Image (cartoon, helix red, strand yellow):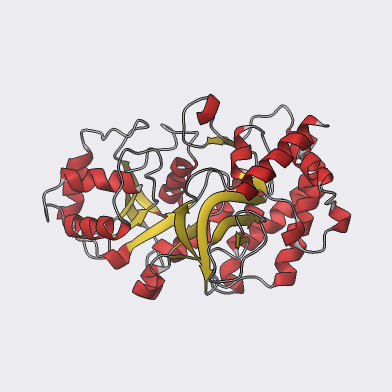
Amino acid sequence: MEWEELCGRLERRFLHVAEDGPCLDPWSEDDFNALAIEAFAWQFELCAPYRALCARRNVLPHSVRNWREIPAVPAAAFKYFDFVSVPLQYAGTEPAAVFHTSGTTQGSERRGRHVVYRESLYRASFHHPFRLALLPDAERLPVLSLIPSPIDASASSLSWMAGMVAEAFGEGCEWLVGADGVWYPEALPVLLEAARSDEPVLVLGTALAFVHLVERLDRGEIRLPDGSRIMETGGFKGARRSIARTDLYASIATHTGVPEERIVNEYGMTELLSQMYEPVLTEGADALGLHVAPPWLQVRTLDPTSLEERPEGEEGIIAFFDLANLGSVSHVLTEDLGVIEGGRLRLLGRAPGSEPRGCSRAMDDLMAAVESR
């Protein structure tokens, strides 16, 4: 089947990108464009809600010449529709995963869903970018996770990612918190034991988890071995408090002994299968705050009202085109603000106030298209 053949080609490209050059190097415009248009053709054919939106805008596979012309779906739309772009042979079968966004159950806090049938595509997109960002100089490390395990939190894409880290790069893994975010009783003893060892460790956690960690520790109580590194994933959304990133990293360094240049921020979304990282381990402080996309993930900033693309250096709403999303929808419009600097993304946080007008119009367009089918 041609869809399966495209999946296989993408997986091989993702896994063997190191043979083409560093993950930080983008593919050529023609190369990415050809794959994006091919992915769009399948998504148009296989995903009814998305096809309705594209038809309403009169954007059809045979008429598209550039991937930027392909309609983007607002991330909020994942709360209302399952964007599933897989052949009929998958009908009636259980998906490999169904990831849910944070929030409560329904109403204004209805949770978004990202249905994943092709788990191998997700794994392939994860592997090399993570290694370059966190383990450029090591094969495997013991993993200490302040993120719940994928067994405890199977609907969390972040927990699935932590599980992939443990499987692919972990020399064993200790899960220190449960699905409810409550620390296991043995968590602190495990951290103290790691500090007494001379073997570096890899610690995974959200920003809020690290706030809780430093609150539990006396200054300098734990000094993790030289060569340890930390992956911090953000995560103050919905929390009652937050802390400035610079203050958080300084506090983590003070309480764990892991220097700030070995704390790597990861950016991801439930609606995307690819992740972005800051390459601080290989590039140092100059890379702080700038996230690098793998070559199969294109990032743009758009005018909040018109959704016209903004030039590099100008703030706008972030849009992603993720080829790893072949089984759902690749072009996703967020409500996050950012700016492109030197081809890299600087995140500026959530758009303040109400939903940006361009996102609102895109959502209205999608709803109207589906209702008129």
Q: Nearer the viewer, residue 368 or 269?
A: 368
Q: Residue 190: where, in percent of width, then height?
A: 21, 44
Direction from residue 217 to residue 261 in the image, left or right: right
Can you tell which quarter of the image residue 81 is in?
top right
- Total labels: the figure holds 0
Q: Residue at x 20, y 48 (%)?
A: 214
Horizontal side of residue 76 vs 210, given as left or right: right
Whole-percent x, y for residue 327 in the image? 69, 44
On-image quarter of the C terminus: top right
Q: Residue 45 occupies which quadrant of the picture?
A: top right
What residue sits 63% from the left and 55% below the top? 322
Q: Is residue 209 above or below residue 310?
A: above
Residue drawn where x is 69% and y is 49% of the image: 326
Pinpoint residue 65: horizontal percent, then vertical percent. 82, 63
Is residue 151 positioned above or below 274 on the image?
Answer: above
User: Looking at this view, is 356 or 63 the one in front?
Assistant: 356
- Residue extending furthest top? 106
Residue 135 can be seen, yes or no: yes
Instruction: Tell me where residue 95 appears, x and y as whole percent.
Output: 63, 34
Left or right: 321 in relation to 172: right
Q: Which residue lies at the image location 62% right of the left edge and 66% below the top edge?
A: 310
- The residue positioned farthest toward the right in the image shown: 62
Residue 88 quadrant: top right
**Can residue 84 be seen here?**
no
